[in-house]
Image (cartoon, grey):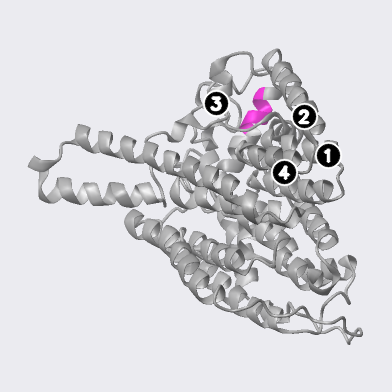
Amino acid sequence: MLTTFLSVVLLYLGVDKFYYVLAGGRKFATFPDLRTQLAVGGSYLLLSIVYLIWLANLLSSSWLHSTWSFRTILLKTSFFWIAAFVAYPLGNDTYLYLHAGLMNLSGANPYLIRAASYVTELSPYVDWGQTSTYGVVSQALFTFSALFVTIHPIVAIHVFKLICLALHLFNGYVIWRWLPIPERGRITIAYLLHPLLLMEQVSSAHVDILVSTSLALFAISFTKQRFWLAFLALWGGVLGKTLPIIWAPWVAVTLLRQGHWRWLLAMIAASGAIVTGLWFTVMPNLAAWQSILNPGVAGQYQSSLMSIAKFALDLVRIFTPENLALADQRLILNTLSSLTLVAFLFFYSWQLWRSDKRWNNTPQMLIEEMGWTTMFLFLFATSWLMPWYCSILITFAALVPQSRIFGLTTLAFALSSSAQYLLGMNASLKSVVSIGLPVLTLIISAIVLRSKPAPPSEPALEPLPEPDPTAELN
């Protein structure tokens, strides 16, 4: 019922908002009023909690294992991903994507021309004024989808959503192929049905799904030592959204440890060729390259450790304004932001150094370490944290289900991210929940689980009749 309610309400709100703004109404970012925010945000959070209860039951059962083919899994989960496809995107990001696509079709370079300074028929819906922050792979998908704006913008939006849905199902298939037989069925179902993935990567069609696809393809290609395919998968993710670039040191270190230094040199040379090609085509100057680093959020803080620090300094300015001027507050925040990045670099360096002593030379270890690096970046060194950023961590968790601490922390992070819509009006509480819940889960799980040995793997079972694990969510 919750899934149906959210799908129908989001579809109604999205279509109503489209025609409301088209008629000259006031543009808004996410929700038109507090009542709608409480209804949608509360339902989404409740669905996420129900999912966790259902997931605990699913993972504790032993009947599924490998008895279902991927086609069967798709059929059993189809109601939920179809509902996510039908639902209208929450927010205005999809309009921004199509706006960039229309710019490309008109010959305007979105890396050099600010979105707010170029007029298309979707300009009334765009509230992000800077140049594009997305790579050329994303731009290609934006441009293809924008071709359908001539039919109707809503059609174009669902064309782009169809691409995102196809990628979500493809990611599930790659995960199903990657995992060992005893656990792949349950993990794949849990992945395909995760509310945050369905809400953010399918319903709202955020390009973070390209990063998930990049990771899944990289994992399976690197495992089979198809290094050029792994290289292309990694670069495909970077050219979708720049996040995967932080995984490059892990890949380089792993190749060196495995004695593949010639492959590493070839990849460095190929990367140089890609950068050169982009420089002489769509990204011809430094400003274009800076664009994909999202400079528009510099000095802004949301749902992050820095947002909590800003709230604390705001309290000081409110109650003792003589002790802290606005300029001093900004200086302190800039300094703290720089320190979090330095801390991230130290953590990353420590990870690389430590891995030399505990490395087991498996792709699973590589993926897990990449996941911890990404999680640390989000939790402690990202000043502007959106609800959908966590979605890539869910892909990591699905690829390495044996890492129980990482998996539990990711589930907590996803739950706290789901709460952001409900808590949107209270920035301080939203930040405390967004960061505090996963950090607390990390600490508790590290204490509890590391004191217990991992349970033995379950033996293969004979196929049983096929109950429907999705029934509880219907």
Q: Earlier in the sequence, mark 2 or mark 4?
A: 4
**Helix, strand or loop at mark 3:** helix
Residue named by callout 4: 254
Quadrant holding the C terminus: bottom right
- Left or right for 320, reference 288: left
Any magenta on residue 39? no
Please determine whether, in this image, residue 395 is positioned above or below residue 128. Answer: below
Q: Nearer the viewer, residue 132 or 360?
A: 360
Amino acid type of the residue that numbered disc 1 sits on in the rendered structure: Phe
Marks 3/1: CA distance?
29 Å
Q: Earlier in the sequence, mark 4 or mark 1?
A: 1
Amino acid type of the residue that numbered disc 2 sits on in the rendered structure: Met
Amino acid type of the residue that numbered disc 4 sits on in the rendered structure: Thr
Amino acid type of the residue that numbered disc 3 sits on in the rendered structure: Ser
**Tag nearer the camera, 3 or 1:** 1
The disc at residue 267 is 2
